[in-house]
Image (tube, rainbow, N blue to C red):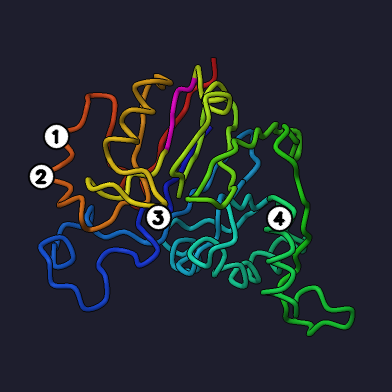
Amino acid sequence: MQVRLLGTGTSQGVPIIGCRCPVCTSDDPRDHRLRTSALVIVDGVHILIDAGPDLRQQMLRCGNTRLDALLLTHEHKDHTGGIDDVRPINFLMKQTLNIYGQPRVMRAIQHDYAYAFAEHKYPGAPALAVNPVQPEPFTVKGITITPIRVRHMTLPIFGYRIRDFAYITDGSFISDTEKKKLLGLKILVINALRREEHYSHFNLAQALAIIQEVKPERAFLTHVSHHIGKYADESPLLPKNVDYGIDNEVIEIADD
């Protein structure tokens, strides 16, 4: 299995428009973060997790031209704003893209991209199909995907586990029951917005506490803001099996 961190930044990305802090003005590419998203390739199946406003740039940067499924964590625009940019992949593959997520999220996609679901739609509209899923395992082309119930402040959202990999972003609470779904992981990607507490996202201490509790072999922090600091300064301070995710970083996960 291969996981590519397409983007590891917050809803505003890093650098932030108009900010002149040391992180936003850094010339270290590790400090440049597009909106959070990941591409998972397992047994030849290409699964995208979230499709934010930077999707076009992310696909061009990594050279990927195939998508078999899109998993949405929730409906906020920094996670769904790039869905129209799947059109070239529709054309290349000559296939409709299947989107999976909570029923509420699927309704939001049908509303926000109504032109793609119209009875008589414009010929150039993206080819999309919504697939509402419950918090129970489901399959995409033979790959089992386990939703993980997470709260984003009071909004119920999904993380996802695929084999020995799990991805959680925008979380601020995970129940003990759902944490059990994170046991035995080789790789965990989890959000860590900043050091100070936040009303709707894990801060660094909270993310590290979850990592310590569920004990993945390695963990990567995503949805990182400029408040964390520069990568070169802050990464060495983390536990040995934890690192800040880097945009376009590829993580290889060996099969047992």
Q: Which residues are magenta?
A: 185-189
Mark 3 or mark 1: whose residue is earlier in sequence? 3
Q: Quadrant of residue 98?
A: bottom right
> What residue is disc 3 on?
7
Label 2 and label 4: CA atoms lie apart by 38 Å
Of all residues, the one furthest to the top in this rendering is: 256
Residue 205: percent from left, percent from top: 27, 35
Q: Quadrant of residue 34?
A: bottom left
Q: Residue at x 73, y 78 (%)?
A: 125
Amino acid at dot 2: Asp
Using residue 110 as the reference point, say whether residue 195 is left or right of it: left
Look at the numbered disc 2 and give the secondary structure of its residue: helix
Q: Residue at x 56, y 50 (%)?
A: 49
Label 3 and label 1: CA atoms lie apart by 21 Å
Tag 1 and tag 2, C-beta contact below 8 Å: yes
Main SS class of the magenta portion in the image: strand
Amino acid at dot 4: Ile
Tag 3 and tag 1, C-beta contact below 8 Å: no
> What residue is disc 1 on?
236
Q: Tag on residue 99?
A: 4
Label 1 and label 2: CA atoms lie apart by 7 Å
Q: Residue at x 28, y 47 (%)?
A: 197
Q: Residues within 10 Å of mark 2 (few under 14, many from 20)?
A: few
176 or 95, which is in the foreground? Answer: 176
> What residue is disc 2 on?
233
Label 4 and label 1: CA atoms lie apart by 38 Å
